[in-house]
Image: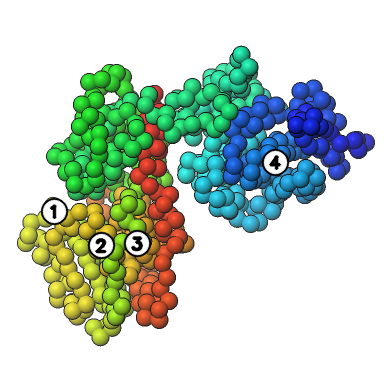
Amino acid sequence: MFSLIPIPSTEVGEDGQPKFYVFPNGQENFHFWADQEANGGVDPEFRLFLGAQLQSGDVLIDLAPGVGFLALTALTSGIDAIRVVTVSETLAGASALESNGRLAGGTIDALTWEHVEASGGLDGLSRSIRSESHVFIRSGPDALDRNVALLWSLFKQERVAALLIDPAVSGTSELVGHGVCRALAFVPHALAERDGELLLLPLKPGGPSQPMIAVPRVVSATTGAEVHDGPIDSETAHASLGFHFISPFCRTGYGIAGANLIHALDQVKADVAFHPLGVIDPAIVPVPSLHSMQDRAAALPDGSPSVRMSQQFDLLAQVGTGPRIGFPIFELDRFYVQELVHLKAQDRLLVCSDWARTVLRGNGLTEMPIDVVPLGVDRRIFHEDVPGGPPEDETVFIQIGKIEPRKGQLDLLAAFEKAFVPTDQVRLVLHCHNPFLKAADLEALVAPFRRSPMASRIDLHLEPLPTQRDVARAIQRAHCGVFCSRAEGWNLEALEVLSMGKPLIATDYSAHTEFLTPENAQLVEIDTLEPRGVGHWAAFGARQEESLITHLRTVHRQRSEGALTPNIAGIRTATFFSWEHAARCLLRAVAASV
């Protein structure tokens, strides 16, 4: 027989009255919850933690809501614009939560698992959350792996402020919780009180099953994980993460990435000793602390981590005796034996994309910790308001990247020749300087473009663009970027095109799938792979060519009709993939290695 008496919250408002009541609405075991609340409260650790951490605009996603005490605590916290989402097993449970939220004076987005699965799963829920919101997630350990996977985009974007893990009835919370947290680079903690102050104390594996409050490792390692009267602050907490960073600082892809990472690490005040590979080109990006970073090496402890950003065959030379972290950028899906020697010699590997991590796992690196550290774009340079613009009387397509088979310029030429005729008002602009080729070899590669029946509609630029701002100006003079690459290690230029709000056409394969989606790009689907060297890359056949032709014609038609609009989704993507975000991903990975 169900109790009909509502349960008053142990938390009281300024008037001394309970902040909320939980009404039974027919739930089973209601007396169990009533007893718990009367004897100190349901979920007391989680409720105290949220009380100290929630800020305006935060989101609580409760995947194990019970009868709703944690959800109602967040809802009645008195903080503006808190969003509370619950997912229940039954419709009756969801209805009860929705009703109790309404009676408490707020709104709970009370969903069922059936509803979530029918509407795109939790990933669909992730997309509905404002990009500036911090998210707190509560889950039971029995479904923790599943729930983390379903909400992976939030973890990937570093928007999860804490993961609240309920103890399991079976006693497996400790094992499951620690395992998942280790994979996420989160650290499990227990809430404790010391001299009237709430503290988070790290939990080590092997202890009793208990509620876990897991926070990102970079936060835990740098703040002592103390709970203050405000959010745990990771913004100024990087000084203790001293490490060596080895990379080029020049106009190659590695050099552009290395320079921008160093700049971002300087901006977040990371404690970095920089060891440049080759000559530094200071014109790429100004780094005020560059010289002091180079002088920092002697002051770091000998056991500090060392990160080397270089090719997969050039990772052995690290600094000091600390953890060795390799950061290779590669395009193929298999490695030579000597490359595997370099990869396996590392204690940890960093890659730009989930695709790259999958490749490493497929090459036998199943036990190696591998973190995704996506690269970025500098929106101070690549933005939608760069002066100038494309001509009004013709549609300009642009591709930037050294000319080589991997970049697919000949595939683009073949599609361009079939999509248009010389009298069409179109133009293909190729910035295809390749510093690794002799002049004669470069001319041989561009000869098909000079002989093309569309040659009068093709502009070839064989000299490098002097600065990043020159790259931005070149993109601004085009209507659409085209990248039909067979394989990419990242594709800096494609992200720069998105950042400037330009439409983009690209192959749906390899590392640039980390940031390219059907919302921000017109994608050419890849059916199969073909051999290349020791590995494979995308096969570009008749179906891919027809898709590329269709995309080219669509952009030209839209421009001709005045219907070509800014790529707002591309700008949103670029805003997320900042170099500061890349630096923070790097710092989190370094923290996980110590």
Q: Horizontal placement of 286 versus 162: left or right?
A: left
Q: Residue at x 35, y 44 (%)?
A: 579
Q: In this orientation, which residue lies closer to the viewer: 189 or 553?
A: 189
Q: Residues within 10 Å of mark 4 (few under 14, many from 20)?
A: many
- Marker disc for residue 473: 2
Label 4 and label 1: CA atoms lie apart by 59 Å
Q: Secondary structure at mark 1?
A: loop
Q: Secondary structure at mark 3?
A: loop
Viewer can see residue 282: yes
Vertical position of residue 132 compared to residue 68: above or below: below
Q: Residues within 10 Å of mark 2 (few under 14, many from 20)?
A: some
- Marker disc for residue 75: 4
Vertical position of residue 412 compared to residue 441: above or below: below
The amino acid type of the residue labelled 2 equals Arg
Which residue is identified by label 3?
A: 385
Question: Residues at badges 1 and 3 in contact (C-beta under 8 Å)?
Answer: no
Q: Secondary structure at mark 2?
A: helix
Mark 4 vs 1, N-terminal side: 4
The outermost residue toward the right is: 1
Label 3 and label 2: CA atoms lie apart by 11 Å
